[in-house]
Image: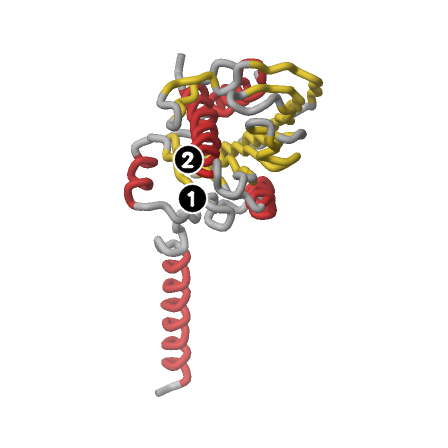
């Protein structure tokens, strides 16, 4: 083969390889969507989320369904993991649009701590509906450029009054809400939850043209050597579900 023919063949091979590389860069594999925001869900749970329905899950500190990579997601996983909680509940939802109004409405509802009074709570143990909180007294409040922090003393039957800090930030297409108790939560005169033993988080974020809502409540409670274990589990898990389901409904209502 002459040197001229050999050069032409090598040139053709180079062009073909370049075309393969270019095609690979445009292939579905290279352009695959981002990793799922949630993990470890059942087929039934995933289908409910795709229908736009909220999903309530009982979880553990090492099996949270939040899978996104972000500073706030890391904070949630780290805090819940370090708490040593024996009651963990999640509330998930996916909205098939990226509507900033949803985050703004959620932020408004979460910031109105006095508005927590009257949230309906269905007691599985008593088989009737109560107010989640029946009293809420603001102790102090401070506002920043992206949110606010409120310390309040509240009462939720059958527990004694306790203080908690509630804070939220709305920026960069994300809503970040945190709550932690600042005093013990007593049950029948005994401290069931110590300072910092109950944390609530809500994380709402836009991704791929959708809005993802993730909430988790985690409680490290003393159940009096199992005497009140069943009742405390129902109580705390029910309150997590009631609070965040209510907030989701308020934030996603168009009226």
Q: Please, what secondary structure does the residue beneath circle 1 have?
A: loop
Scheme of image coloration? secondary structure
Q: Please, what secondary structure does the residue beneath circle 2 have?
A: strand
Is residue 141 found left or right of 69 in the rendered image? right
Callouts 1 and 2 close, C-beta under 8 Å: yes
* Depth order, front residue of 121/65: 121
Quarter of the image where one finds residue 128: top left
For the image, the number of numbered tags is 2
Disc 1 crowd rating (10 Å Cα; few below 14, some 14-19, many 20+) is: some
Position in image of residue 241 (x %, y %): 43, 29
When the figure is inspected, residue 213 is found, relative to residue 75, above or below; the finding is: above
* Depth order, front residue of 107/136: 136
Q: Which mark is residue 190?
A: none
Quarter of the image where one finds residue 178: top right
When the figure is inspected, residue 192 is found, relative to residue 43, above or below; the finding is: above
Residue 8 can be seen in this image: yes
Position in image of residue 217 (x %, y %): 51, 35
Give the residue at mark 2: 92
Residue in the image at 66% along x and 24% along y: 149
Q: Looking at the image, which residue sits at the far bottom? A: 1
Quarter of the image where one finds residue 208: top left
Position in image of residue 88 (x %, y %): 48, 40
Is residue 185 found left or right of 158 in the rendered image? right
Alpha-carbon span between mark 1 and mark 2: 9 Å
Query: Which quadrant of the rendered structure holds the N terminus?
Result: bottom left
Residue in the image at 64% along x and 20% along y: 153
Give the residue at mark 1: 38
The first of marks 1 and 2 along the sequence is 1
């Amino acid at each position: 083969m002459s040197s001229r023919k050999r050069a032409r063949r090598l040139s053709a091979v180079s062009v073909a390889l370049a075309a393969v590389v270019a095609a690979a860069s445009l292939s579905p594999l290279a352009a695959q969507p981002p990793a799922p925001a949630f993990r470890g869900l059942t087929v039934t749970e995933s289908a409910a989320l795709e229908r736009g329905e909220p999903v309530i899950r009982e979880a553990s500190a090492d099996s949270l369904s939040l899978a996104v990579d972000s500073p706030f997601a890391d904070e949630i996983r780290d805090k819940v993991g370090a708490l040593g909680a024996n009651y963990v509940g999640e509330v998930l939802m996916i909205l098939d649009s990226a509507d900033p109004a949803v985050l703004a409405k959620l932020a408004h509802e979460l910031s109105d701590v006095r508005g927590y009074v009257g949230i309906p709570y269905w007691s599985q143990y008593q088989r009737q509906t109560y107010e989640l909180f029946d009293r809420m007294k603001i102790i102090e409040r401070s506002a920043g450029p992206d949110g606010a922090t409120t310390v309040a003393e509240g009462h939720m039957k059958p527990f004694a009054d306790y203080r908690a800090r509630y804070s939220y930030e709305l920026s960069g297409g994300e809503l970040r809400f945190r709550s932690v108790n600042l005093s013990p939560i007593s049950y029948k005169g005994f401290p069931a939850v110590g300072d910092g033993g109950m944390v609530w988080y809500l994380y709402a974020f836009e991704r791929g043209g959708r809005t993802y809502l993730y909430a988790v409540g985690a409680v490290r409670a003393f159940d009096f050597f199992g005497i009140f274990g069943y009742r405390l589990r129902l109580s705390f898990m029910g309150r997590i579900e009631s609070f965040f389901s209510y907030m989701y409904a308020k934030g996603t209502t168009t009226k």
